[in-house]
Image (cartoon, rainbow, N blue to C red):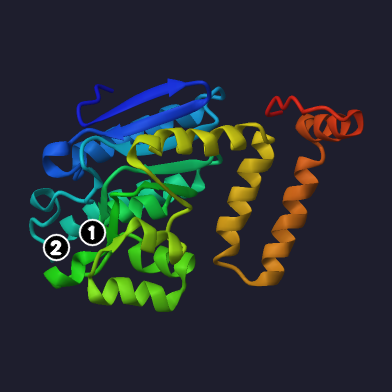
């Protein structure tokens, strides 16, 4: 698929997808969503890719949906179709059994923040700003913003951000648990790479399983969550990676995981 609004670069186990629509603050439309889906599907099939990273070109990470694309006939089935396209993509990022990181280079609001919330870790430049300004336009964050944000930062903080529609700085976002790290802009990709390299040294099957169980456990009772942990562990114990991990521990050396 020809990519016009994003780019995909794979190097040393890390796939980096960059939003390339800086004239519109990396707003996405149907074409960009299609390109994003194709890029994620491609990297999901590549065993050499261990970590996926999203970032933006210019002064924004993303402001979410291009309103010129998102608002035609808003009260009809067309809106629901468009919303489902975004929802399915964000859900796919959570379901992907590879870690997904957001390297947030600038403005990250609306659907852009909803995409970042679908990632596993979020690293931000000091200049980045975060928020859900939708209430200023008489609507709500409707692609996971209300639900995912509350899980991440708690109901009280989620309501403060969403009901006021105000933006917060990267430092404030770090304090409330919205992001994992804040660094100077020039160190953003290096810090993101640091996280990726740490993860890539771990067992890939274990990393994928842990991600799946953590995400699933948010929506089930505690007993079911623990049952999932037992099942997941029983599967991993039969893998070559687990054998290698135990062997490396006994031999006091770094493990060499194969993803099998």
Q: Secondary structure at mark 2?
A: loop
Q: In the rendering, at what x and y percent does residue 126 appear?
A: 33, 49
x 79%, y 29%: residue: 240
Q: Which residue is mark 2?
A: 76
- Front-most of residues 18 and 72: 18
Quadrant occupied by the N terminus = top left
x 70%, y 57%: residue: 228
x 16%, y 37%: residue: 22
Cβ atoms at labels 1 and 2 below 8 Å apart? yes
Left or right side of 34 for 93: right
Disc assigned to residue 43: none
Left or right side of 42 for 208: right
Q: Which residue is mark 1?
A: 80
Left or right side of 19 for 98: right
Left or right side of 177 for 141: left
Crowd around label 2: few <14 · some 14–19 · many ≥20 (10 Å): few
- The quarter of the displayed image where residue 61 is located: top left
- Front-most of residues 88 and 212: 212
- In the current view of this chain or complex, which residue is farthest to the right? 250
Q: In the rendering, at what x and y percent does residue 204 appear?
A: 64, 35
- Front-most of residues 84 and 18: 18
Q: In the rendering, at what x and y percent does residue 96 appear?
A: 50, 42
Residue 255 to residue 209: above or below: above
Q: CA distance from mark 1 to mark 2?
A: 7 Å
Q: In the rendering, at what x and y percent does residue 5 appear?
A: 21, 31
Residue 11 to residue 50: above or below: above
Q: Secondary structure at mark 1?
A: helix
Quadrant occupied by the C terminus = top right
Question: Is residue 199 visible to us here?
Answer: yes
- Front-most of residues 41 and 4: 4
- The quarter of the displayed image where residue 171 is located: bottom left
Crowd around label 1: few <14 · some 14–19 · many ≥20 (10 Å): few
């Amino acid at each position: 698929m020809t990519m016009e609004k994003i780019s995909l670069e794979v190097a040393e186990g890390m796939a980096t997808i960059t939003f390339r629509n800086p004239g519109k603050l990396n707003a996405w439309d149907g074409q960009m969503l299609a390109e994003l889906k194709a890029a994620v599907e491609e990297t999901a099939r590549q065993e050499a890719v261990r970590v996926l990273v999203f970032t933006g070109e210019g002064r924004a990470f993303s402001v979410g949906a291009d309103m010129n694309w998102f608002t035609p006939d808003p009260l009809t089935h067309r809106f629901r179709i468009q919303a489902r396209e975004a929802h399915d993509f964000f859900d796919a990022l959570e379901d992907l059994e590879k870690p997904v990181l957001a390297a947030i280079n600038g403005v990250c609001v609306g659907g852009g923040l909803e995409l970042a919330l679908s990632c596993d870790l979020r690293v931000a430049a000091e200049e980045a700003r975060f928020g859900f300004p939708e209430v200023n336009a008489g609507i709500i964050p409707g692609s996971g913003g209300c639900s995912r944000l509350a899980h991440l930062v708690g109901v009280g903080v989620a309501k403060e951000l969403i009901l006021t529609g105000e933006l917060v700085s990267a430092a404030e976002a770090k304090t409330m648990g919205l992001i994992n790290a804040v660094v100077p802009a020039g160190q953003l990709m290096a810090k993101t790479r640091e996280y990726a390299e740490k993860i890539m040294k771990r067992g890939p099957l274990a990393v994928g399983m842990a991600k799946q169980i953590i995400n699933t456990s948010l929506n089930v009772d505690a007993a079911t969550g623990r049952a999932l942990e037992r099942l997941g562990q029983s599967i991993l114990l039969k893998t070559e990676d687990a054998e290698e991990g135990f062997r490396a521990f006994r031999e006091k050396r770094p493990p060499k995981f194969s993803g099998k």
